Image: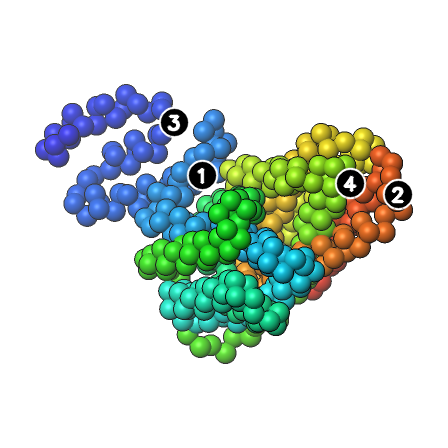
Amino acid sequence: MPHHEPAEQHSPLLTVTADTLVAADFRHRRPKGRGELRDQPQRASTRGRRRTTTPTPSGAITPYRALFRIPGTLRFTAGGILARLPMGMFSISAILMIAGSRGSYALAGAVVATGLAATALVAPWTARLVDRHGQARVAVPATAVALLGGLGLIACVHWNAPDWTLFASYAATATAPNTGGMARARWAHLLKDDPAALHTANSFEQAADELCFMLGPVVAAFLCTTLFPEAGTLIGGLLFMTGVLVLAAQRATEPPPTGRTAAKSPLRAPGIPRLLAVFFASGAVFGSLEVVTIAYADARGHASAAGVILGLQAAGSCVAGLAYGALRVTGPAEPRFRRCLAAMAALMALPWLTAATTGSLLFLAPALLLAGMATAPTMVTAMALVQHRTPPGQSNEGMTLAVTGLLGGIAGGSALGGWVVEHDPAGGAGPAVGTTGFAVPVAAAASALLIAAIRTNSRSPIDAP
C-alpha cells in the first residue's frame, strides 16, 4: 500500500483485529516513517519470541521457528550439529578399528579410556582459551590438532606401530573443542534479555545432542564395517573439522572475547561444585544403562538389537527435550531441577522392573523409551543453572566443566555397570539373568537427586527460567 494513502491502509487492518496476530496489526497502525520501517523487523522478532510462551495451538513449533528468525542462527546451528555428530562416532570407531587390527578389545577400551581422561584434563583449558580469545581464533587450530591426532591413530593402526603410539595419538585428540558449549554460548549471548527464548534454545541444543549421540555410533559402525576399519575415524574427523570451520565463520553471532581477566575459575563459583557432582552422577546413569542393556540383550542372544533399543532411549529424550522447550517455565530453576531429577530416578526404575518381571527385550524397549523422557529436561535445566552460576565471560569454560563431569560419570558408570553384570547373582541362566545391572542407573539417579537436594548457602540465588 502506498504511504500517501493512510486512510485506505488502516481500513483493511481493522478487519483482521480478531486474528491471533493482533500484535502485528497494532504495529502496522503506528506512524511509518523511514526510520521506523527499518526498526520494525527487530521489534517483530522480539515480540515473536514473547508469543512463544503463550499456550496456543501452534505452541509446539512456534518457539523454535522464532529462534531461527534471528539472523545467523540457522548457519551456526548447522555448523554446530555437523561438528557434534562425529563426537558420537569417535569412541566406537576407535574401538572397532583397534580391535579389528590388534584383536584386543581390552587394548581398544584402554586407548579410548585414556583419550577420555586426557579430554577431562585438557577440555577446560581449551574452553578457557575460547572465552579469552574468541571461538574462531581458538576452536579452528584446536580442532586441527585433534584431527592430526586422529590421523596419527589411523597411521599407527595401519602400519602396526607399537601399542604406546596408539595411546599417544588418541590422547592428542583431547584438544577438540566443546562445540555444543560454543553453540549454547552463542544462544546465551544473543538471548541474554529473553529468558523464555533461551530456555527454548537450550532445549533445542539438548535435543540436538541426543540426536547426534544416537546417530553417531550407528554411522560409525556402518562406515567401519562397510567401507574399511579406519573409515569411521577418518570421515568423522573430516566432518568435525568442516563443522567447526562453518561455526567459526559465523562471526556476527560469536560472543565477544573477554581477554585475560583476573576472574577465578568457575569451579570456585557458588553452587558449581555441587552441580558438577550432579553431572557426574547423571553421567553414571547413562554409562551404566548402556552397558547393562547391551549385556541384557547379549544374554538373550540378541546383542545386535541393543543398539536399536538404546536408540529408543535417546529418541525419547530427544522428543521430550523438544517438547520441554516449547513449554512456558516459571519460577526458580533450583526446585524445577530437583523435580526433573526425581522424575528421572522414578522413570529409570521402569527398565529394571520390566526386565526383572518379564525378561523380554520386547517389553524393555518401551520402558527405555519412557525412561529417556526425563533425561533431556533434566540436562536442559542443569545447563541453565550452569549458565547462570558461571561468572560472566566464562560460559564456555563453565559448560565444558559440566560436560567433563558428565563424561567422567559415564566412564565410572560403565565400569560399575560392567562389574555388576559380571557378578550378577542370577548366574548364567534363568529369566532374571542380567537384570541386576539395571539397579545401577536407578541408584545413580537417586544419588544425583540426593546431591541436588543438599541445601547450601549460595551467594548467587538462582531464578533461571
The residue shown at (78%, 44%) is 438
Label 2, label 1: how many angstroms apart (C-alpha)? Answer: 49 Å
Instruction: Say whether marks 1 and 4 touch (CB < 8 Å).
Output: no
Q: Answer with mark 2 or mark 3, whichever residue precedes in sequence.
A: 3
SS of the residue under disc 2: loop
The residue shown at (82%, 51%) is 422
Q: Answer with mark 1 or mark 4, whichever residue precedes in sequence.
A: 1
Image quadrant assignment for residue 266 = bottom right
Tag nearer the camera, 3 or 1:
1
Q: Which residue is disc 2 drawn over?
A: 426
Amino acid at circle 1: Pro
Tag nearer the camera, 2 or 3:
2
Q: Which residue is disc 3 drawn over?
A: 20
SS of the residue under disc 3: loop
SS of the residue under disc 4: helix
Label 4, label 3: how many angstroms apart (C-alpha)? Answer: 57 Å
Amino acid at circle 4: Ala
Q: Is residue 100 left or right of residue 292?
A: left
Tag nearer the camera, 4 or 3:
4
| Residue 171 image position (x, y, % from top left) | 56, 69
Q: Answer with mark 3 or mark 1, whichever residue precedes in sequence.
A: 3
Tag nearer the camera, 2 or 1:
2
| Residue 420 image position (x, y, % from top left) | 81, 52
Q: How many numbered marks have been drawn onto this rendered protein structure?
A: 4
Above or below — where is 31 with respect to 452?
Answer: above
Q: Answer with mark 4 or mark 2, whichever residue precedes in sequence.
A: 4
Q: Answer with mark 4 or mark 3, whichever residue precedes in sequence.
A: 3
In this orientation, does residue 59 appear? yes
